[in-house]
Image (cartoon, helix red, strand yellow):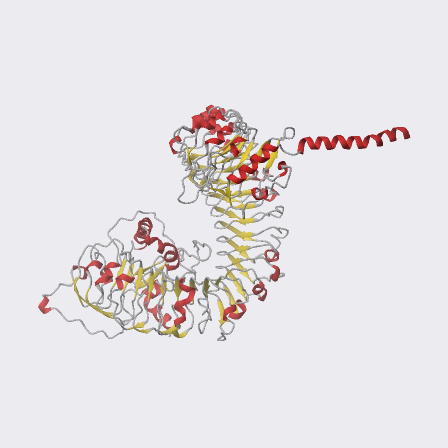
């Protein structure tokens, strides 16, 4: 026994010698000429040494070039067989004499993600006939793909993708020679990537070219190639296909059912292909299918079938399709499902309880559907990161423990539903959570404290338009990462120092409007440089007595301090807020009396100063304005002769109920996009410009009542518009049932006394356009569209349709003789903030009066509001009271 042990000990050194010899043969030094070729290659390439991580390290001091990064050698011969030079910041192409073409044993070449600056694929590459892997993706090659690729018969993988072309540069294309000539003879090819290559001339022949030449193909990637449908049945020959990517093409056809016959299919991506018809359910039942992406095919219909037990599906994306029906209970069979995106579909019914069995779920998005009922427990989905069930009809209460254990959750959006009861306290205990959006629900009760708020990662908190009450917990002002805080339209109360809010140093968007809060501002400006840099600052109806300290706000784009008790002059520092980026300003319904001189109004889109006590000369609006409301003030000047130039892009302009005099300048005819023009209840005189009476496609509402205009009223626009001209004794014409006297006997206009009759039936715009009206949605988002021809046509079409709908019944002030189709839905105004918010139908009215939601019953002198329409949030109002009574109550609010 001892003898045997000794013999084994003796053999150990021998084994070590043999092992070293073997290692040397595999990893020994590369051949000398190969090393020289590599140095020649490096010297011949232009690359950015500060970015390179491989070429820059090739050094002669390292004897064995096979150990250089990016280089691999054959273990027995020492020849270089692989070069990985992707992302090395190589630029200006490869010259025709490069030593690269002399590596005759090269099997693998990767030049992806470099910058060859629109040079053609060098022909020298086709001398490398031993290549089995060639990757030239996203490296800036351009022009026709040569047919010499057909010589590279050993290729297994070919990647010529060109998805990230820099603007102004051309990309690769397949034109002449055609695709068939390029891929013929590549019978060993298993993976083909041609993403972004322009194949428009191969639009309908690509299927046959690929199926006839590539029998062993497993992965076919043709994203954004300008190919079209149909997907030819010849593709069915490729029985080894496991991955198909045809995203962002214009197939304009149905999805062929034969795709369900691919027994090895794991990935099918057909997003943004303009697919139509019914989607074959059999494809969803392929047992090997891991990924199905049909998103962004609005005309594609379908429903979810019964799903197989132990299905392999990991990713299901059906967003922006016309899929409908109920979610099957068998959805719980998809134990591997990690991502499910079905936003903007037509699914209805309840979310099945079996969803609670999806333990691998990471991303769930059912937003913008018609789902109803309670939401199932997801506490088994411990890996859940993203949950979005917004814009449905989900209801019920959510248990306080619902979110316990979901420690990986980053994003929760349950907005625009019908949830009630208290907000689950477990939600405020998740330290990793980034976004909470519960807006537009029926949540009630007190706000819970954040546990360990100072360590929270929360950046967005939106609980607006609920029924929450009580005070805002002080722990909320310890959320150091918070960017967006929106609590508008609740019943929150209490006294809140603005300095407390300013503790949220990273806050960029604040909206506490329309609660029962009393916000106190400090006149101490010593710490103004320490304030958060806001982009949106909204404290409407917060009982402010003075302007907040916003002097050094350099990023501000939206400022709303309306419906408060701020008096005195508008400080001139207001107009420099945002350093030129201020786009929306609303100081309406305050007690302001003047504008501090000197002032220069910036390039605003929305300027709302209505319902104050402003006096003096009326400000000239900026040329960028799309919404301007100066109504219900005491301005007493004339209108600027060049007003039309300043309303070039405006769709709404109101100066009603002031003390303005003089004539309407003819330059008003330059305001070609005006939809609403209200100059009623002033002392204007003279002749009305003919452009306001004749054929004018844009103007929907015109109100010139209660002035001193004179002249004849006629024209194609004024039919059925009597209410637009009432209270002007000097006007005559058929529409007014007033015969025009001879010019020499015509009456002189009565002097204007600066007062209006509160019992008059003329239109009172204060309550139809209180606050911002529909300005914030359309002005900030749609206003810039007016600078472009296509945007203008689109906006005209949408607003014209909108106006036809809301002005078609009695209560019309002025409308065209156009037919409105029955059954057309009323458009709701869109509310826009730092993040997109969309208004929704609600049985309880929470909005203020605006054109889109209100009409005037001229027989009863009553403003009638559609309770299902919400222009923007406000305190509830009696929407059937008369104009005169409303006017009285408003005047009590803003003495």
Q: With 649 as the anchor, is 334 left or right in this view?
A: right
Tell me if residue 18 comes above or below residue 456 in the rendering: above
The N terminus sits in image quarter: top right
Residue 495 seen: no
Rendered location of residue 848, percent (x, y) = 39, 62
Please name whichever residue, 391 or 562, is drawn nearer the observer in this view of the structure. 562
The correct choice, above or below, for 365 with respect to 710 in the image is above
Which quadrant of the structure image shows residue 611? bottom left
In the image, residue 221 sits, relative to residue 547, either above or below, namely above
Q: Position of residue 227 (x, y in %)?
A: 41, 33
Instruction: Give the percent coordinates (x, y) of residue 238.
Output: 50, 26
Along the line of sight, the residue nearer the viewer: 424 or 617: 617
Q: Does residue 826 appear left or right of residue 316 in this picture?
A: left
Quadrant in which the C terminus is drawn: bottom left
The image quarter containing residue 457 is: bottom right
Is residue 886 positioned above or below 69 on the image? below
Question: Is residue 57 at all visible to an observer of this figure?
Answer: yes
* Position of residue 316 measured from the top left corner of the image (x, y, whole percent): 52, 40
Pick the residue in front: 820 or 781: 781
213 or 165: nearer the viewer:
165
Q: How many marks?
A: 0
């Amino acid at each position: 026994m001892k003898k045997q042990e000794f013999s084994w000990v003796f053999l150990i050194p021998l084994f070590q010698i043999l092992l070293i010899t073997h290692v040397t043969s595999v990893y020994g030094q590369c051949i000398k000429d190969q090393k020289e070729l590599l140095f020649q290659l490096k010297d011949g390439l232009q690359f950015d040494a500060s970015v390179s991580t491989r070429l820059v390290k090739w050094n002669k001091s390292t004897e064995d070039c096979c150990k250089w990064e990016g280089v691999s050698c054959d273990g027995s011969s020492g020849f270089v067989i692989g070069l990985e030079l992707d992302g090395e910041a190589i630029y200006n192409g490869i010259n025709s004499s490069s030593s690269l073409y002399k590596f005759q044993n090269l099997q693998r070449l990767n030049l992806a993600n470099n910058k060859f600056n629109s040079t053609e694929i060098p022909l020298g590459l086709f001398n490398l006939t031993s290549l089995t892997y060639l990757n030239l993706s996203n490296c800036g090659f351009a022009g026709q793909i040569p047919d010499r690729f057909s010589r590279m018969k050993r290729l297994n993988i070919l990647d010529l993708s060109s998805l990230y072309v820099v603007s102004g540069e051309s990309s690769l294309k397949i034109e002449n020679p055609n695709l068939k000539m390029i891929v013929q003879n590549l019978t060993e090819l298993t993976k083909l990537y041609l993403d972004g290559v322009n194949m428009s001339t191969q639009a309908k022949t690509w299927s046959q070219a690929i199926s006839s030449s590539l029998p062993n193909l497993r992965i076919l990637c043709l994203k954004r190639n300008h190919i079209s449908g149909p997907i030819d049945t010849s593709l069915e020959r490729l029985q080894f296909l496991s991955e198909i990517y045809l995203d962002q093409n214009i197939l304009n056809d149905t999805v062929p059912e034969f795709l369900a016959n691919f027994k090895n299919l794991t990935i099918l991506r057909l997003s943004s292909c303009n697919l139509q018809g019914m989607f074959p359910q059999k494809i969803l039942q392929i047992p090997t299918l891991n990924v199905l992406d049909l998103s962004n095919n609005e005309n594609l219909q379908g429903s979810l079938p019964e799903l197989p037990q132990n299905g392999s599906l990991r990713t299901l994306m059906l967003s922006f399709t016309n899929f409908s029906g109920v979610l099957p209970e068998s959805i719980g069979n998809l134990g591997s499902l990690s991502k499910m995106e079905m936003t903007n579909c037509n699914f209805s019914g309840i979310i099945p309880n079996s969803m609670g069995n999806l333990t691998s779920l990471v991303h769930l998005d059912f937003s913008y559907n018609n789902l109803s009922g309670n939401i199932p427990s997801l506490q088994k989905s411990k890996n859940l990161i993203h949950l979005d069930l917004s814009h449905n009809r989900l209801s019920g209460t959510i248990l306080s423990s619902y979110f316990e254990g979901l420690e990986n959750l980053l994003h929760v959006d349950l907005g625009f539903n019908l949830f009630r009861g208290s907000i689950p306290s477990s939600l405020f205990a998740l330290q990793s959570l980034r976004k909470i959006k519960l807006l537009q629900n029926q949540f009630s009760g007190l706000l819970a404290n954040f546990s360990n708020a100072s360590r929270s990662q929360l950046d967005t908190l939106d609980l607006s338009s609920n029924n929450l009450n009580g005070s805002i917990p002080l722990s909320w002002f310890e959320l150091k990462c918070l960017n967006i805080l929106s609590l508008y339209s609740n019943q929150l109360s209490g006294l809140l120092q603005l300095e407390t809010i300013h503790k949220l140093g990273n806050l960029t968007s604040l909206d506490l409007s329309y609660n029962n809060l009393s916000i106190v501002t400090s006149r101490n400006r010593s710490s103004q440089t320490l304030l958060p840099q806001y982009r949106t600052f909204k404290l409407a109806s917060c009982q402010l007595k003075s302007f907040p300290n916003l002097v050094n706000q350099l990023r501000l784009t939206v400022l709303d301090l309306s419906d408060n008790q701020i008096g005195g002059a508008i400080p001139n520092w207001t107009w420099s807020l945002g350093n030129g980026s201020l786009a929306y300003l609303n100081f309406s319904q305050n007690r302001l009396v003047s504008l501090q001189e000197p002032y220069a109004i910036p390039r605003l889109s929305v300027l709302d100063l209505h319902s104050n006590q402003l006096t003096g000369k009326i400000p000239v609006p900026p040329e960028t304005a799309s919404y301007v409301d100066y109504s219900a003030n005491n301005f007493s000047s004339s209108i600027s002769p060049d007003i039309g130039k300043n309303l070039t892009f405006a769709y709404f302009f109101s100066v009603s109920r002031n003390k303005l005099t003089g004539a309407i300048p003819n330059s008003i005819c330059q305001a070609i996009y005006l939809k609403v023009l209200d100059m009623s209840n002033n002392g204007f005189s003279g002749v009305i410009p003919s452009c306001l009476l004749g054929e004018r496609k844009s103007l929907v509402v015109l109100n010139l009542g209660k002035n001193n205009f004179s002249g004849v009223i006629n024209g194609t626009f004024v039919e059925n518009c009597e209410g637009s001209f009432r209270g002007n004794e000097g006007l005559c014409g058929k529409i007014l049932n007033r015969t025009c006297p001879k010019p020499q006997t015509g009456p002189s206009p009565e002097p204007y006394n600066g007062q209006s009759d509160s019992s008059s039936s003329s239109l009172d715009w204060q309550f139809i356009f209180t606050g911002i009206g529909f300005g914030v949605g359309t002005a900030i988002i749609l206003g810039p569209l007016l600078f472009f021809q296509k945007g203008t046509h689109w906006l005209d079409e949408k607003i014209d349709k909108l106006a036809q709908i809301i002005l078609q019944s009695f209560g019309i002030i002025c409308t065209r003789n156009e037919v409105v189709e029955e059954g057309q839905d009323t458009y709701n105004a869109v509310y826009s903030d730092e993040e997109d918010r969309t208004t929704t139908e609600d049985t309880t009215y929470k909005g203020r009066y605006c054109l889109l939601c209100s009409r005037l019953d001229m027989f009863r002198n009553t403003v009638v509001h559609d309770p299902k329409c919400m222009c923007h949030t406000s305190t509830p109002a009696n929407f059937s009271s008369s104009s005169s009574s409303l006017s009285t109550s408003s005047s009590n609010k803003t003495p």
